[in-house]
Amino acid sequence: MDLLASNDSPLNRYGSLDEALVHRRAPVENRVFLRTLLNRMPIERLLRADGGITVVRSDEAPDICVRKGYTVGFQTEEEIIAVVGTEAERWESKRKPGTWAVDHPVGGRGPIIEAEELAAERGPVKPVRGKRVAKPKAEPKVKRPVVQERVQPVCPNCFMLMALSGVCGNCS
């Protein structure tokens, strides 16, 4: 876990995009993709962020957030298409409304990954209770017929229990 300093702190900055990608252990395919994606935009600085890398742009455009599996913060879909073409999956972001996101080649799962991260950040959702419905009553159990237990007779002579046949094994 990274300890974050303030945004202005040199401890919170990366020296280059390559340094940031190595620190975040990005796969090689994603490194090539992100270099292509980010090299055409004016970058003021790269900051450590809780879930990835924040790219602060010097052209007053919104910051770009590089996360695991996707990058979010582009102003238009055309901005993404101009750099990486139409083969990469793109979608309107729910994390940053009014911006666009693009999938990385490795680990990208489209808008699903963004929705899962947002749900994890918000915490568990309490289930909505609907109308209560009673459980169906269980069928009554069928009672087995009761078999009476045979009582062993007592011998009138020695007062010992006799066999169920009625013959005392002690007296005979």
Image (cartoon, grey):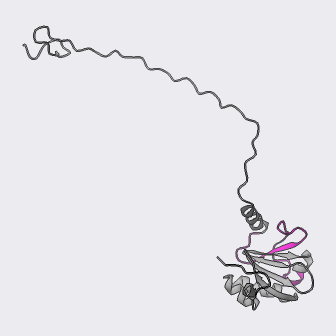
Is residue 12 placed above or below 73 in the rendered structure? below
Residue at 87%, 79% in the rendered image: 80
> x%, y% of residue 40?
87, 88
Residue at 12%, 14% in the rendered image: 168
Q: Main secondary structure of the magenta part?
A: loop
The question of residue 86 being in magenta is answered with: yes
Magenta residue span? 81-109
Is residue 31 placed above or below 145 in the rendered structure? below
**Which quadrant of the figure has residue 26?**
bottom right
> x%, y% of residue 140?
55, 23
Q: Could you tell whether 143 is left or right of 159 in the image?
A: right
Residue at 84%, 83% in the rendered image: 56
Is residue 13 placed above or below 151 in the rendered structure? below
List the single residue furthest toward the bottom: 15
List the single residue furthest toward the left: 172
> x%, y% of residue 31?
73, 85
> x%, y% of residue 1?
64, 76
Residue at 92%, 85% in the rendered image: 59
